[in-house]
Image (spheres, rainbow, N blue to C red):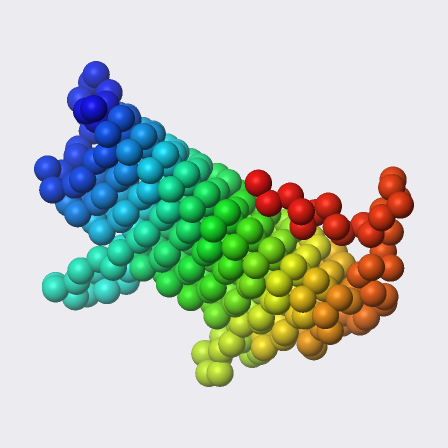
Amino acid sequence: MSTKTSPTGSQRISKDAKIGANTRIHDEALIYPGANIGDNCIIEPGAIIYENVKLGANSYVGSQCILGERLSGYLSDPSYKNPSLLIGENATIRSGTIIYADCKIGKGFQTGHRAVIREKSIFGDMCSFGTMAQSDGQMTVGNNCRFHNNVFIATFTTCEDDVHFYPMSCTVDSMHPPCQKGREGPYLEKGVIVGAKVLILPRVRIGSKSVVAGASVVTHDVPPGMVVAGMPAKVIKGREEVRCHIEDRPAYDVAMENKG
C-alpha cells in the first residue's frame, strides 16, 4: 500500500529516501536522501529526518522533532558524511525531541517532549527518556530503563538493565570541571533506583538494586542492595528493609516490575 501524505503536498521527501507502506507524512516534514522509515509510521508536521536514519516500523515522530542531527564535523569538513541513527520499532518520539546521528536505540523507545540525545548514545529495548531530559552523548543504557523529566546524563555514564532515574537528577563526568582530562562517568548496575534531585559524581559505581534517596550527593561506591541518603550519601539500611506503607511488602518491588 502507498505512503500517505498531506493533501497540501508541502512535505519535502527525497526520492532517495525509503518510506514504508501505510506511513503517513504530514505538512512541512523534511525527509533526506538515505533515510529509511518503516511501515505504519506517523511523521508529524515540521519533523526533520536526516540522511542515514533508520526508523523502525509502527513508530511515531512528533512535530518539530529532528532525527539524525548532524555532528560538529558537518560545519568544517567538506567530505562530511552523517553517521547512522538506528531506532527500533514501536518508538514514540514526542514533539521537539532532538536525537543526534551516531546513536543506536532499541525497540519500544519513548521520549517526552523536547528531550535531547547526543551522539554515541546507546539504549537497549523498552527504555524511556522524559520531557526536557538530556544525554550528553557516549552513554550506554541497558533494557527497561526509565529517565524522568529534566534528568541530565553526562558523557561516559553506563546503566545496566532496569535502572530508574527520577526528575532533575544528574550524573557528571569530571571531578574538576571544566578540566577535560581523565573524564569518566559513573556506573549503575542492574535495578538501581535514583531519586529526584540526586547528583552522582564521576567514577562512582552503584551496586545492583541499590536505592539513592532524593537530593543525595553520591561521592563513593555504593554496595549492592543498599539504601543511601545524604550529602555525601551514606548507607542507612538495606533495600529490603524499606517497607511499603500501604501493603506488607518491600517498598521497591512494584516499581521495577512495571516494564511496559
Provide residue 198's location: percent of width, then percent of height.
68, 60
- Is residue 235 visible in this depiction of the protein? yes
- Quadrant containing the C terminus is top right
Q: Nearer the viewer, residue 165 or 65?
A: 165
The number of callouts visible is 0
In which quadrant is the N terminus drawn? top left
- Left or right for 68, reference 109: left
Q: Residue at x 67, y 66 (%)?
A: 208
Q: Quadrant of residue 121?
A: bottom left
Q: Residue furthest bottom?
A: 181
Q: Position of residue 114 (x, y in %)?
A: 46, 42
Task: Identify whether 149 is placed above or below 47.
Answer: below
- Provide residue 132's location: percent of width, then percent of height: 51, 46
Q: Quadrant of residue 76?
A: bottom left
**Closer to the camera, 241 or 178?**
241
Image coordinates for residue 31, horizontal then vertical, percent: 21, 39
Horizontal placement of 144 versus 43: left or right? right
Q: Is residue 108 above or below residue 162?
A: above
Above or below, 78 against 13 in this view is below
- Give the quarter of the image for residue 222: bottom right
Q: Residue at x 78, y 67 (%)?
A: 226
**Residue name at image x 45 percent, y 61 percent:** 136
40 above or below 75?
above
